[in-house]
Image: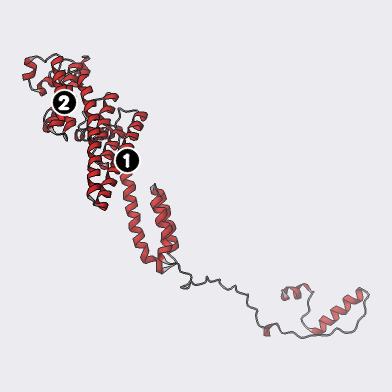
Amino acid sequence: MLIDGVTAGSVQRDAENAISQMKAIRAVLGLQCNDPEIIEYDFADQPKEEPEQKKARRGRKKTEKDIQDPKDFFEPFYLKLEQATTHEEVDSIFAECKKLVADTDEYRVHLQDFIVKIDEKYFQLDQLDIKFNADDTSVKANSDAFLLHEAETNNIDPQVTDSATIIEDYRFQINNAPTVDDVLKIRSLFAANNHLEREQVQSLCVLCEAKIEELNWWESQKQAEVDTNTGADLIEFKKLKEDAEESIYQEQLKDLIERASKASTPAEANALVRYTTTWTQVQRAPLIRAISKRLTELPQPKQDEVNIPLISRLQDAPDLKTLELYETEISLAHPSVHKTLQNMAAKRRGELTRSGAE
């Protein structure tokens, strides 16, 4: 810049010429002044000013007081993980936890335990996906297999589809259940039955609750018997128990005799005996007489049909109505052949349906 000023004539090389130039300029402007004061200034000797540097801001180092107890730190994440229902939620929870743990060495050891829980949650969600994404045919097949197994266990004919008959069977099973666990098992069975309406299931649930209360009362009485352990109380308790059992027996007997009198086939009448497995021979006698009486009133099957094995009759059933009649006899056969007979009945039903036979 100084060189440019000298070249342009606005700056002089020495003090004498600079003073002459200043006087000439002031004369042109009509100003009078003494000689100007000259100040010598050496630019080369001045120290260079360094630009101010901003100090980097450093975060405050965590102290032991700032570090939360690992158990308290991970507790909210475990709670969120337990409530997660999708893989995306689990991913989000893990990312959030990992980000906070990265700055604290004390938490990294416990992070491994949390990762184990993450893997377990992924496995649970995968199992749920497999279960709910299965096709409807597979689900229905599994449900039918479960109902068939449970029905056989509880002496309920799996071939029966009439809701009134199904409800009657379940009511009898509930009233005759010896323990609370048996009642709960029966409740889970009819709740999964596709042939019952919602209102029918609810009515059976009410009956289950009443039966559970009754069984719990008996259990409390047994406990009271143990606690008191007195002869008088024991005698009274046994009498109450016998009276209650007799009342239940009479009610069940009346119900079975009535059903025997309305049986439409010999097989249906004979099938009622399966409800008396816990009865004594004396208790069973009135029902046997009622069944025998009904059998004399029903038309007897042809002699040649009696001698033909049931599996052959199922295989050669001429129509669906006859097939249904033969199916009522399956429950009377030995349990080891139930599945074979049911498969044959299902096969013949399909053939008759395709052929249009009624």
Q: In the figure, 116 relative to 200: above or below?
A: below
Disc on res. 187? none
Label 1 Cα neighbours within 10 Å, binned few <14 / some 14-19 / many ≥20: few
- Determine which quarter of the picture holds residue 189: top left
- Determine which quarter of the picture holds residue 33: bottom right
> Looking at the image, is mark 2 or mark 1 nearer the viewer?
2
Q: Residue at x 43, y 63 (%)?
A: 72
Q: What percent of the width, then of the height, locates residue 183?
A: 27, 38
Q: Residue at x 31, y 50 (%)?
A: 123
Identify residue type, mark 1: Glu
Marks 2 and 1, the one that precedes in the sequence: 1
Secondary element type, mark 1: helix
Q: Residue at x 28, y 40 (%)?
A: 184
- Determine which quarter of the picture holds residue 170: top left
- How much space separates mark 2 and mark 1, taking CA atoms? 30 Å
Q: In the figure, 281 relative to 119: above or below?
A: above
- Left or right, 47 with respect to 286, comes to right
Secondary element type, mark 2: helix
Q: Are marks 2 and 1 in contact (CB under 8 Å)?
A: no
* Count of numbered labels shown in the rendering: 2
Residue position for label 2:
286
Label 2 Cα neighbours within 10 Å, binned few <14 / some 14-19 / many ≥20: some
Identify residue type, mark 2: Pro
Q: What percent of the width, then of the height, locates residue 324?
A: 19, 20
Q: Residue at x 71, y 84 (%)?
A: 42
Residue position for label 1:
213
Q: What percent of the width, then of the height, locates residue 10?
A: 79, 74
Q: What percent of the width, then of the height, locates residue 35?
A: 87, 84
Quarter of the figure that contains the C terminus: top left
Q: Nearer the viewer, residue 192 or 109?
A: 192
Quarter of the figure that contains the N terminus: bottom right
Could one spot residue 343 in this view of the protein?
no
